[in-house]
Image: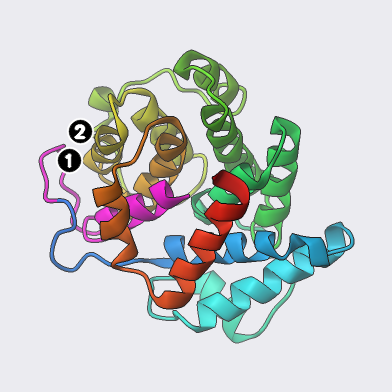
Amino acid sequence: MIGAIIGDIVGSVYEFKNVKSKRFKWFAKGCRITDDTVLTVAVADALLDIAAANDEASFKELLIDKFHYHARNHLLCGFGARFLSWVSKQQRTPYNSFGNGSAMRVSPAAYAASTLEEALYLAKLCAEITHDHPEGIKGAQCTAGAIFLAKIGYSKEDIRSFAEKYYDLSFTLDEIRPVYKYEISCQGSVPQAIVAFLEAKNFKDAISNAISIGGDSDTIAAITGSVAGAYYPISEKLRKKAFSYLDFEATDIILRFEEKFIK
């Protein structure tokens, strides 16, 4: 999960200032957490309390409560207009989105799951409270499944084969880098994020790959980082740097989540 947060922070200053290169400054001036991190923490918070939910409907209500709570406390973190409207009007029904927000926040579901099937099920629930369009659910499930397989030690070839059930991955970053544009749909950013992981040599290289193609840099890097963080070790130095951007509540939620589901 911390991999998604690192990707979000590092990519935050490049979302509207694309670099189209792997040579850029990490944790540059102006880096911050965005909605990607806020909602990742919200999903983790809900999963920590999942025992209080008696069924699917009550867990989704819990998720909605957590989304409203954490978003209201971080309204200036770059939420999309539709999500902000959903929060400000205290809505509790989805709005048929297929944006990459469903994939950027899903990593805790993969860590809380004991099986691939459970990871896909939790990803669906976490997506469809807002992103109930089939493409929104698909993006969340592909990401969660890739994270789960990485977490339990599957090879990159296995992860690629899994992801190819959802998307065409027959491209390289070098091929798309010159022409890739800003794209916030799942279908226009999740495949690119997965390939950024697949081409990487280590965790930092995965984040660098993701940001190097441009586009919605913070979210692509968050999705890539969520998979890469399950596959590769993350240095304590990087973890500490990421935590320095978080407030006490978010830090506490992440540490309790890691204690329960990861360590």
Provide residue 71's location: percent of width, then percent of height.
52, 76
* Residue occupied by mark 2: 178
Residue in view at x 52 percent, y 83 percent? 72
> Image quadrant for the C terminus?
top right
108 and 263: which one is in front?
263
Q: Which mark is residue 20?
A: 1
Majority SS type along the magenta span: loop
Residue in view at x 75 percent, y 61 percent? 50
User: How many numbered markers are drawn?
Assistant: 2
Q: Are marks 1 and 2 in contact (CB under 8 Å)?
A: yes
Q: CA distance from mark 1 to mark 2?
A: 7 Å
Vertical position of residue 47 compared to residue 220: above or below: below
Quarter of the rendering containing residue 62:
bottom right
Is 8 within the magenta? yes
Mark 1 lies on a secondary structure that is loop
| Residue 102 can be seen, yes or no | no
- First to last magenta residue range: 1-25
Question: Foreground mark, 1 or 2?
Answer: 1
132 and 256: which one is in front?
256
Three-letter code, disc 1: Lys
Provide residue 166's location: percent of width, then percent of height.
60, 28
Q: Earlier in the sequence, mark 1 or mark 2?
A: 1
Label 2, residues with CA under 10 Å away: few <14, some 14-19, many ≥20: few
Residue at the far top in the pictured view:
157
112 left or right of 236 in image: right
Label 1, residues with CA under 10 Å away: few <14, some 14-19, many ≥20: some
Three-letter code, disc 2: Pro
Is 143 within the magenta? no
Provide residue 245's location: percent of width, then percent of height.
30, 68
166 and 183: which one is in front?
166
Residue in view at x 47 percent, y 36 percent? 230
